[in-house]
Amino acid sequence: MKKRVLILGAGPMQAVAINAAHDRGWEVVAVDGNPNAPARLLADLFEPIDLKDRAGLASLAARLAAEGGLDGVFTAATDFSASVAHVAEAAGLPGHSLEAALNASDKLRMRARFREAGVPSPRFVGVDAESASRLAALMEGEGIAFPIVVKPVDNMGARGCRRVDRATDAPAALADAIRYSRSGQAIVEEYMEGPEFSIEALVFDGKVHLTGLADRHIFFPPYFVEMGHTMPTEFPAEDRAALVRVFEAGIRALGLTHGAAKGDVKLTPRGPMIGEIAGRLSGGYMSGWTFPYAYGIDLTGSALELAVGLRPRSLAPTHEWVSAERAWISIPGIVSAVHGLERARALPWMRDVFPRVRPGDEVRFPENNVEKCGNCLSAAPVRSDAVRTAEEGARTVVVRLASHNPRTDAFLAEGPIGATSFPPDAFEIPGLARGELGRAGLVAGPEGWLLPTPILAALDGPRDWQGRTIAESLAQAVSLEPGLGSRLRDPAFASAAAPALIRGGIQGILYLYDSGNP
């Protein structure tokens, strides 16, 4: 008999689950708070229901059960695993218990469960708007010292999450975290030093079935922006085993027993410590893309099978490749064009190029994982090929910005060069201050372009956020806009172009050209 499954979310990340269900011949009912959710047209039936509306979701599930039956409820890459568990529990469907899902959704509950079970994780304290003024006393009571991490207790994608090194920066960080929290609560916890990993598993039959372990690549402090991941990790077997042991202990502490589990774990000087564990499949292109590219396993389909009470067909890899995902980003402004998409797609070993912005969109330098501009996904038998392709693809794409925008102007005017404040400069040249570029003499460099001597000396040294050198950025900019080459031979333009290039990279110098400056 045909299965019917209720899928929470109808965005691009949930399209994989909808298609996997259809591949099995199942009927799909999708819900999303956005009545124009892009994957709604893939579903057999779509209902515009807010995913926070648990009563509305449960009512829909009861109606579906009465009108043809309902076999499972599922989500991937959303923050609503508790809504899934609520519906499953109300309708008598397979899944994690509501208690376990709440433990895996609320970071205060999560940390408390870990502490009770002795699972390695940072010391913490909960803070809301009322108690924010007493942060110092609350931290002292829990033995927490700076640096700390402040984040909402109930959000994902690193929204409102930031490292804080001193007390004077804490109020702004708390206000930001509380603003992003649906419950109005933030969690303050010890900062964990060390590399970070993403671990994926399916839990059933009383066992944790590990399905993937990837390196996460985090940048731009004080924020935590994931510029990509690489699967599988390249860390030694001993480290992998230690990470998995702590992850499995965390799953047991939260009470997750039937369904997907996804963890962020750090390898600190004190050993593995859990950042968080969610009772769902991961987002960020991992579970639906890079995992099957690396191993040939239909992880989303296997998780769906658990959701309708079936055992996964197979979790055995059909091959063992490496898959890499890398993001590209932008300085603030309004998009006028996105260059290089087809060239990136044509690279050897490239599997997908997903732009997330288009002309007319407003962009900003990312403070979280939902403010990036696009992603390149590769897969290859050899790690170096996969990594090189994804990174080259991200460098190939250029988000060009509309001229005469106050936000772009303000970004390019910031300084000084080399400062460690956020947002960082595209190129960091140690010891160089912004004023020095204006005073430095211009010297003819490649193609006769006039460059300040400090930049000429650093042409092949520092790299920008995507990995371009200064020389590569200049060459790529001129290839996109040939008229720029002659402007770079004009002393007035070259003097203005130097700080724009160092501050804003290839985008900065193209913006200066498009704005007709100086």
Image: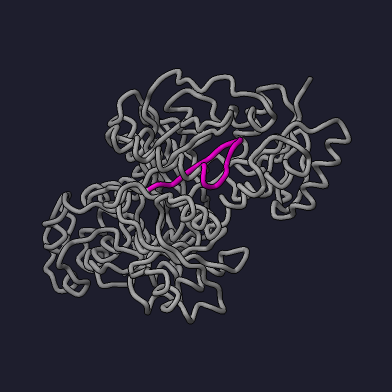
Residue lying furthest right: 67
Question: Where's residue 123, x and y in %?
Answer: 41, 62
Q: Which residues are magenta?
A: 252-265
In the displayed structure, 26 sits above or below 284; it is above
Q: Say if residue 335 shows up in the picture.
A: no
Question: Where's residue 109, x and y in %?
Answer: 55, 57
Which of the pair 273/230 is nearer the observer?
273
Which of the pair 263/221 is nearer the observer?
263
* Colouring scheme applied when the structure was drawn: one colour
Question: Where's residue 51, x and y in %?
Answer: 70, 51
Whether the magenta-drawn stretch holds residue 326 is answered as: no
Question: Where's residue 317, x and y in %?
Answer: 45, 21
Point out the image quarter for the N terminus: top right
Point out the image quarter for the C terminus: bottom left
Q: Residue at x 43, y 78 (%)?
A: 137
Q: Residue at x 56, y 64 (%)?
A: 180
Which of the pair 324/315 is nearer the observer?
315
Q: Is residue 252 left or right of residue 64?
A: left
Q: Say if residue 412 shows up in the picture.
A: yes
Q: Residue at x 84, y 35 (%)?
A: 65
In the displayed structure, 156 sits above or below 129; it is above
Residue lying furthest bottom: 133
Q: Residue at x 61, y 48 (%)?
A: 101
Q: Is residue 20 left or right of residue 158?
A: right
Q: Is residue 371 left or right of residue 89?
A: left
Q: Quadrant of residue 183?
A: bottom right
Numbered marks: total: 0
